[in-house]
Amino acid sequence: MDTPTRARSVGAVTARRARFEQPLELRCGRSIAGYELVYETYGTLNAERSNAILVCHALNASHHVAGYYADAPGNVGWWDNIIGPGKPVDTDRFFVVGVNNLGGCFGSTGPASIDPATGSPYGADFPLVTVEDWVAAQARLADHLGIARFAAVMGGSLGAMQALSWTRQFPERLGHALVIACAPNLSAQNIAFNEVARQAILTDPEFHDGHYYEKGVKPVRGLRVARMVGHITYLSDDAMASKFGRQLRNGSIGYSFEPEFEIESYLRHQGGKFAEYFDANTYVRITKALDYFDPALDTGGNLARALSAVRAAFLVISFTTDWRFAPERSREIVQALLRNGRDVTYGEIDAPHGHDAFLLDDPRYHALVAAYMDRVYDELGTAGAASTGTGAAAGAHAPADIAGDAR
């Protein structure tokens, strides 16, 4: 990770906290009131409040999208390579908002938060939330910020699913959607990977049916395995072969169950790091939200009909070696939009990195995003010029070792 003093950083940031007392009705049939969302902003909201960009995060990321924390300069935002002054999402032009979703574990109300009805952490009693619920909560945050319409909503992976859902739930409240490394729903194989990861957590003796907070323990073993399973799916076979191959850590086979191959050591390291900062109850809920996402569920599987009411223009990007959300899944979205006569730009980037590619520095990928954002800015006209408003914001700190680890 580059140092935060590099050129074109948004600089030191903090986060803000918004509280909402009005109950939010959830897809599961329950509601939640008195919840908080933690968010960060970068850039300046123009006088017309027309230059706002919402960034939706993926599975284990947060509101900390760009910049760094003054007291933790190594904690750089997970999409800092694409957001900042002069970067593809240029904060000299746009006012960028990142939010930690409801049910998260980086400051927004989630399973580890105190349930006002009991005075104890929600734990397993925290409701299952969906992509649609997150979007509804984000719309309330937009209201709180005085943003009636986003110039664009964007995200990668699960974040892209939220961007796609925005176009259906609030078609008049955004001009553009950037849908990157996405699928219109999970395949059976993807659901299977998520279930294996969840079972690793749910069967950990320290999980205690989700009420492990009051026990003073954490299902670390389950979280480690869950992360290892997930991490395998983020990398392509070529990327693994290039980075690790069959390299042995000590140069020879030791005939033991200790990590002997470099890839084993890498996965254990990733799993251990993840278990230090992520919450197990949040993890099992977010993977369920992934499983449940299916815009065409209520239209008999007809995605074109499910997207018939969208009004936004789209940039859809896929990566050739992303076998978790393969390019053909992105093309399903493109075809459904074209059947509705929507404005769609599609880019398929030949990249070796697998699903992780949406987080990495690929000049073709970044150039495509930059060119599209030029269009978004041009459409703002004189309203796009930054003027006096709310400046780069800022608050609650995420753990330093989440930086750059944002699926």
Image (cartoon, rainbow, N blue to C red):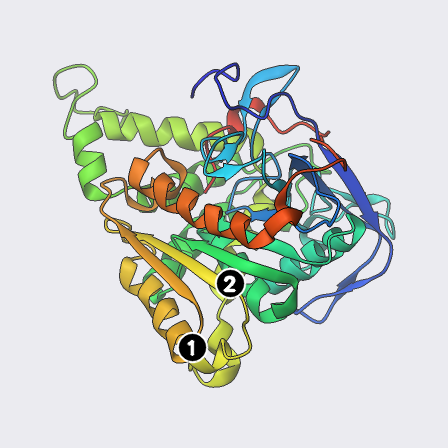
Comparing 121 with 379, the one in front is: 379
Comparing 180 with 206, the one in front is: 180
Residue beneath the point at 17% across and 31% down: 242
Badge 1 is on which residue?
Answer: 341
Q: Is residue 87 visible?
A: yes
Q: What secondary structure is found at the residue carrying circle 1?
A: loop
Image x and y of residue 224, in percent: 44, 36
Using residue 159 as the reference point, say whether residue 255 is left or right of it: left
Using residue 366 as the reference point, say whether residue 158 is left or right of it: right
Residue beneath the point at 39% across and 26% down: 269
Quadrant of the image for the C terminus? top left
- Name the quadrant containing residue 392: top right
Residue beneath the point at 38% across and 74% down: 338
Residue beneath the point at 36% across and 68% down: 334
Q: CA distance from mark 2 to mark 1?
A: 16 Å
Using residue 66 as the reference point, say whether residue 317 is left or right of it: left
Quadrant of the image for the N terminus? top left
Q: Amino acid at mark 1?
A: Gly
Badge 2 is on which residue?
Answer: 164
Q: Is residue 129 visible?
A: no
Circle 2 residues within 10 Å: few <14, some 14–19, many ≥20: many
Circle 1 residues within 10 Å: few <14, some 14–19, many ≥20: few
Q: In the displayed orientation, state which residue is furthest to the left.
A: 252
